Image (spheres, helix red, strand yellow):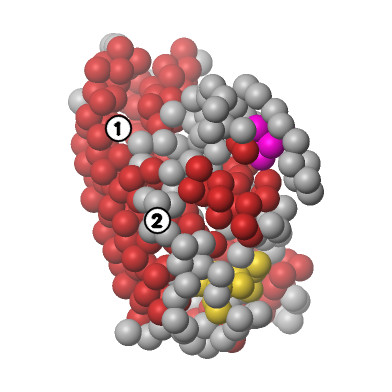
């Protein structure tokens, strides 16, 4: 299969995993007792957790296979290990316990009720919030597995960003751009865009580098343009304004290592020539030191390695992402 075909297949598999997992979890949420939201959700949480964990693992397996296939379509792969998809399931994509993240909608629902919102409306808001969380966690597991597969193969210099229509304005202006292998994948909650591993410096990944955000804009009718880019923004773009200047692509976009947690992996420090980041230094001593319940996620590893690929690969193995 070509690179583009592999990208399309990965997106289909991801969307299926996301859709099935979200539907299952929202069915569980429907059984929440409005008179005991936190207590009833606490009893239902293990069932919801199991569904999300399974969805993450499905997405991660697909992501690992995807990166291998895309690299093989461009060159002879040079992997150093095998992506351990199970290590990317059962944990939130920012490293916190998944149960903690999934408990948030219940607590915020109770907060809304306490502020005077009718219980039915509050539960509906909680349901929407839960759906967004599930979409993000399943999609992130697939993307992280794909990124680990990419980083561990030294033939890959970076990746291109491929949108998943209907893409928002922030994603549209980033589509087709090339990023170095250790660049965190910027996304917003519920984002379904993906990496496309690229071999060689700014290599041609089956023409994906030639994607023109303007072509995406022109493919939309005026109503869609106004909805995605805002009426004023779309009008400015139609009048010839630069799309990148109209759209603040960074607004609301984060990498998983910045989703609200300060990462800390062990209780001991060390010295390592050329490495200064504290969380990375701690992680290098984790083989003998005690650990907290916050896990160092792949994108934090890339950030802390500061461009040193060998250190990044070593740490991916240390934390169980490579075997």
- State the SS at label 2: loop
**Residue 130 screen position, x and y as percent:** 38, 36
Residue 53 shows in this picture? yes
Q: Is residue 295 above or below residue 11?
A: above
Residue 137 shows in this picture? no
Dot 2, how many residues are within 10 Å of its Cα: few (below 14), some (14-19), or many (20+)?
many
> Which image quarter is the N terminus in?
bottom left
Q: Is residue 304 above or below residue 153?
A: above
- State the SS at label 1: helix
Residue drawn at 75 percent across, 36 percent down: 271
Q: Nearer the viewer, residue 311 or 49?
A: 311
Instruction: Please count the marks in the image.
Output: 2
Residue drawn at 32 percent across, 57 percent down: 61
Q: Which residue is mark 1?
A: 49
Q: Nearer the viewer, residue 41 or 147?
A: 147
Dot 1, how many residues are within 10 Å of its Cα: few (below 14), some (14-19), or many (20+)?
some
**Residue 78 screen position, x and y as percent:** 47, 72
Task: Please provide the residue range marked out in magenta.
Answer: 278-282
Q: Is residue 51 above or below residue 145?
A: above
Q: Is residue 268 magenta?
A: no
**Residue 304 screen position, x and y as percent:** 68, 46
Q: Is residue 279 magenta?
A: yes
Q: Which mark is residue 83?
A: 2
Residue drawn at 22 percent across, 41 percent down: 24
**Residue 246 screen position, x and y as percent:** 73, 66
Q: Is residue 74 left or right of residue 20?
A: right
């Amino acid at each position: 299969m070509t690179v583009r075909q592999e990208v399309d297949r990965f997106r289909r598999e991801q969307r299926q995993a996301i859709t099935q997992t979200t539907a299952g979890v929202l069915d569980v949420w429907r059984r929440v007792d409005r008179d005991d939201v936190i207590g009833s959700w606490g009893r239902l949480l293990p069932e919801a957790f199991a569904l999300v964990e399974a969805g993450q693992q499905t997405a991660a397996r697909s992501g690992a296979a995807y990166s291998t296939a895309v690299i093989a379509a461009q060159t002879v792969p040079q992997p150093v290990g095998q992506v351990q998809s199970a290590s990317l399931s059962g944990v939130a994509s920012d490293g916190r316990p998944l149960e903690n993240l999934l408990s948030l909608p219940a607590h915020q629902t109770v907060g809304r009720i306490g502020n005077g919102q009718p219980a039915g409306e509050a539960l509906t808001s909680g349901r929407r919030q839960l759906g967004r969380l599930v979409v993000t966690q399943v999609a992130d597991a697939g993307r992280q597995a794909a990124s680990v597969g990419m980083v561990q193969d030294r033939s890959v210099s970076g990746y291109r960003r491929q949108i998943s229509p209907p893409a928002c304005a922030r994603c549209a202006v980033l589509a087709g751009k090339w990023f170095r292998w250790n660049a965190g994948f910027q996304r917003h909650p519920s984002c379904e865009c993906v990496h496309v591993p690229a071999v060689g410096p700014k290599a041609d990944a089956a023409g994906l580098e030639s994607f023109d955000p303007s072509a995406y804009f022109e493919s939309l009718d005026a109503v869609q343009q106004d909805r995605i880019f805002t009426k004023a923004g779309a009008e400015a773009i139609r009048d010839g304004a630069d799309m990148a200047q109209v759209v603040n692509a960074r607004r609301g976009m984060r990498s998983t290592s910045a989703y609200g947690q300060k990462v800390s992996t062990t209780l001991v420090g060390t010295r390592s020539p050329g490495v200064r980041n504290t969380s990375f230094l701690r992680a290098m001593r984790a083989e003998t030191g005690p650990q907290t319940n916050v896990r160092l996620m792949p994108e934090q590893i890339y950030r802390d390695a500061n461009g040193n690929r060998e250190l990044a690969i070593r740490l991916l193995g240390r934390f169980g992402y490579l075997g």
